[in-house]
Amino acid sequence: MSAVLETRLSRGERGSALVEVTWLGILLLVPMLWILLSVFEVQRGAFGVGGAARSAARAYALAPTDAEGTRQAELLARRALADQGLEGAPLAVRITCTPYPADCHSGTSVITVRIESRVDLPLMPEVLGGQAPSFALDATHTVPIGQYQEVTGAAD
């Protein structure tokens, strides 16, 4: 009788290890895949924000006036984010100058551009918490203005 019982029990358990390993693999693989995709998204955003800060600072320093520099800086920062696939990402451009805050293009000024943005983490529905979770990013780039500048329109 015990041999028949053992045979029935062993047949009933046959194949269940495969099912258990499959479900365990799925339960572990899905969160790992989400973490991996989130890391790639944040890295892409970090590259975009860093490139945006560099481009914006250079554009501002090369512009003839502060107003034109601000316009060019925002335009190039937006373009740098778009190059990384972040066209719709929020963008804040902050420009500060020392020691002449009112005239950034004066000789010996140091221009600092700070870019702030964020990336939304992928595959996370808004149903779970109101808004999709996001990761805040920022980058800063500093450019000095040379002491000697070209003056246009001067006749000798």
Image: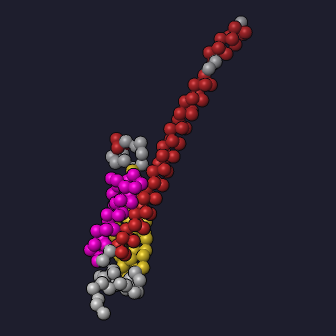
Please report the residue visible at 69 percent of the width from the left and 8 percent of the height from the top: 4
Q: Which residues are magenta?
A: 65-92
Please provide percent x and percent y for residue 60.
35, 73
Please tell me in which quadrant of the rendered image residue 63 appears.
bottom left
Q: Nearer the viewer, residue 149 or 125?
A: 149
For residue 100, say whether it is visible: no
| Left or right side of 27 for 6 | right
Q: Residue furthest bottom?
A: 156
For residue 121, say whether it is visible: yes
| Left or right side of 68 for 144 | right
Locate the C terminus and report the quarter of the image it occupies: bottom left
Please provide percent x and percent y for residue 56.
37, 68
Residue 79 lies in the magenta-colored region:
yes
Please report the residue visible at 43 percent of the width from the left and 71 percent of the height from the top: 141
Residue 129 sits above or below residue 5 on the image: below
Please tell me in which quadrant of the rendered image residue 127 appears.
top left
